Image (cartoon, grey):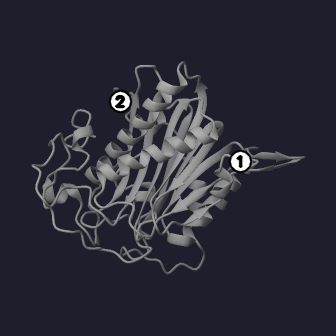
Amino acid sequence: MRPGPLNLITDVAGVRVGNACDARLRSGVTVVTAERPFVAAVHVMGGAPGTRETDLLAPDRLVQQVDALVLSGGSAFGLDTCSGVMQGLRAAGRGFAVGPVRVPIVPGAILFDLLNGGDKDWVENPYPALGQAALRAAGSAFALGTAGAGFGALTGVLKGGLGSASCVLPSGITVGALVAVNALGSATVGETGQFWAAPFEEGAEFGGLGPAPFAALPAPQPQKQMGEATTLAVVATDAALTKAQAQRMAVAAHDGMARALVPSHTPLDGDLVFALSTGARQMADPLLDGFQIGHAAATCLARAIARAIYLARPLPGDLQPCWQAVFGPPTSA
């Protein structure tokens, strides 16, 4: 496997990502969409998720494709980001046809960033407008680190952020991952700057520091309270998957989260993974290709998590240091 040309989820042809953020609010949103509706699924492993319209992603539900996926800050207020995205998609003529009416299908999930030092004393919920702005910004290139849904993210130790990575399988199938890391756990090993995800690093995409020497670590202590921690991810492929196959891809991708964040999937996190398939490429060998797609999704997600932390940048008023402030400036994006 090798990274795609951008090493972003948008290396999956047709996938587009848009970010929007508000520095005063210290929060933001990320929208994943595509040139046409796509198959999507979800798998939740955290104990404190916040979601919208995820039930319809089950394989037995009527709607088989969606128009966008939303990752947002703002806790439950951020679920209204989906409304802004729906409004923008409706204006573009997108949505599930019900007679003469089109209803955009926009599942979403949120993370808690209400106690990160930003000004949350708004009169009108800002998230619908941020959703529209992110949709308008959607393209193949987008910022990582302190950006989008990861703009105000925190972890147990360092600032969180937005990360992405991709790979191309020997079959030509492309897999990519996108993640907003606001975890209770840590992406780095002990007090070092080395990443749990180091064995999966491609080149020096998060510093090329290699694995930390193994040492027994003390039992972790929660750094956040219930509902304050969540890692939200999207994994994507151009392989033609059914909703059930996409759900298995999401399940496999959680392995990558566990490899990159210690601990993960706790009762205090809302960890979840969306999976999407553009359906552009038929699988020549469904058994082998499906097996490799799941492994690639996990590997890309582990790498994306490390990149999110590695590329976070310092801002005035930060409550936590970013990786580069503690361990040195990034040497590679």
Name which residue type carries label 1.
Answer: Asp
Can you see residue 138?
no
| Front one among 203 and 59 | 59
Residue ID at (65%, 50%): 58
- Residue 273, given in percent of the width and then of the height, sits at 49, 51
In which quadrant of the rendered image does the C terminus lie?
top left
Whether residue 81 is situated above or below residue 116 in the rendered picture: above
In which quadrant of the rendered image does the N terminus lie?
top left
Tally the numbered discs. 2
Residue ID at (55%, 23%): 283
Of marks 2 and 1, the one in the foreground: 1
Q: Which mark is residue 26?
A: none
| Front one among 26 and 33 | 33
Q: Which residue is mark 1?
A: 60
Most extreme residue toward the right, as rendered? 99
Whether residue 142 is situated above or below residue 3 in the rendered picture: below
- Residue 244, given in percent of the width and then of the height, sits at 61, 41
Q: CA distance from mark 2 to mark 1?
A: 34 Å
Instruction: Specify the quadrant of the image occupied by residue 314.
Output: bottom left
Q: Residues within 10 Å of mark 1 (few under 14, many from 20)?
A: few
Q: Is residue 96 left or right of residue 305?
A: right
Circles 2 and 1 in contact, beta carbons < 8 Å? no
Q: Is residue 246 left or right of residue 209?
A: right
Secondary structure state at the residue bearing disc 2: loop
